[in-house]
Image (cartoon, rainbow, N blue to C red):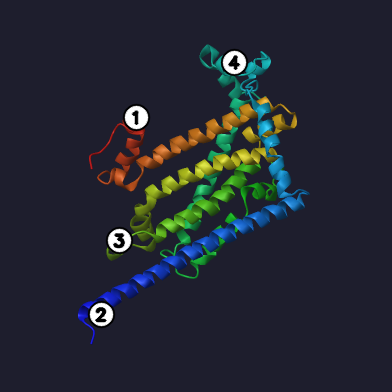
Amino acid sequence: MSSPDADASEVVSEQLRRLDRARRIKYGLWVGFLAATVGLTWWGMDYVAANAGLAIGDVIDRFPDFLAFFGNFFPPDFHQFTIYTQDEDVHGLDALWASFRDGGAPLVDSVFSARSSLVKASLVTLLLGFMGTVLGFPLALFFGVLGSERVVPFPLNFLFRGTMSAIRAIPALVWIFLYIPIGPPSQMTAVLAIATDTVGNLGRLFTDELEEIDEGPIEAIRSTGASGTQTVGFGMLSQVFRSYIAWTLYILEINTRIAISLGVVGAGGLGFLIRNSQDLFRFEQTAAGIVMVFIVVLSIELVSSRVRARLRPGEHDSTGVVEAVRSLFDPRKWAGLDRREP
């Protein structure tokens, strides 16, 4: 008859063997997954290269030429930065400093000029992203709220979810061509394409946020005899309004990048200038356009991220909506100098 200590030791040994087997199986699955991913990627690269009349070896051999090609982009030439630099034939980085003469008058003149410049193109790109976001927001809110099972019962809510999924399945670069009956690819159709894309992407984010809210405030509102609309407004949307603003700002960042891509197909803005300078083999001016892309994208991302940081739920737990919005304009918080004690 075995002793209790021997039985306990056997149980522990068996558990250790099970854990060891589970660990081996887990590692084996991960190795198999990585191997399958690498193999599929290699096959996909070979398949795509073959369709282009190349081989993977050709792509690798030509990579040094690709790196050498970027030597044509330096130094960036900001000749197209403003109308003034174009008229005065100012090139290189000197065009930047020259554009800030007379208190930045060349910048203002370029914004309101009918001629193209990097300053005007940057403004157009920002406006395309902004207007597309603003126009798409109401429908995104409509579909996003009605797509939630908390608002519309299953399966009717999938009518709205399906609509958003269908919109997301078509990228904005395709939507701009679907709007050709309204007009050729232009700034107007670009705004419509971005707005349509916003409905699908932002609406889905709105729906997901509603699915994660607490049930307590909803039941509290219902217990007062509130109508369905009041329950949605005060019991649901009141819990997610900060998140909705944060997601809208995030989509604004994405839409600014989309606006640059649409410029390549005729929507104007920075994408259009970059494509034109590339077609004319003015690579230094192409580089200047790319630098402006970085500046525009990083600027909108910086502003958006700081606003979203101020709207985090823990940031204003003890303040109301008015105080939360007012604090957005506090320079100390924007600079990260106002730190609350934990």
For marks 4 and 1, the one nearer the N-term is 4
Cα–Cα span, label 3 and label 1: 37 Å
Specify the label residue 94 is tagged with: 4
Q: Are dots 2 and 3 in contact, CB under 8 Å?
A: no
Query: Callout 3: 10 Å neighbours few (<14), some, many (20+)?
Result: some
Q: Which mark is residue 275?
A: none
Q: Nearer the viewer, mark 2 or mark 3?
A: 2
Residue 331: give its label: 1
Residue 269: where, in percent of width, then height?
63, 33
Badges 3 and 4: C-beta atoms under 8 Å apart?
A: no
**Three-letter code for the amino acid on which mark 3 is drawn:** Ile
The residue under the point 28% across, 33% down is 338
Q: Nearer the viewer, mark 2 or mark 4?
A: 2
Label for residue 221?
A: 3
Which of the two residues, 323 or 10, is positioned nearer the viewer here? 10
Image location (x, y in percent) of residue 245: 42, 46
Q: Is residue 181 visible?
A: no
Q: Three-letter amino acid code at disc 2?
A: Asp
Q: Residues within 10 Å of mark 4 (few under 14, many from 20)?
A: few
- Does label 3 or label 1 sit earlier along the sequence? 3
Placement of the N terminus among the 4 image quadrants: bottom left
Residue at screen point 30% across, 31% down: 337
* In the image, farthest residue toward the left: 4
Look at the picture and state if 35 lies above or below 21.
above
Tell me the SS state at disc 4: helix
Mark 1 residue type? Pro
Q: Which of labels 4 and 1 is toward the front?
A: 4
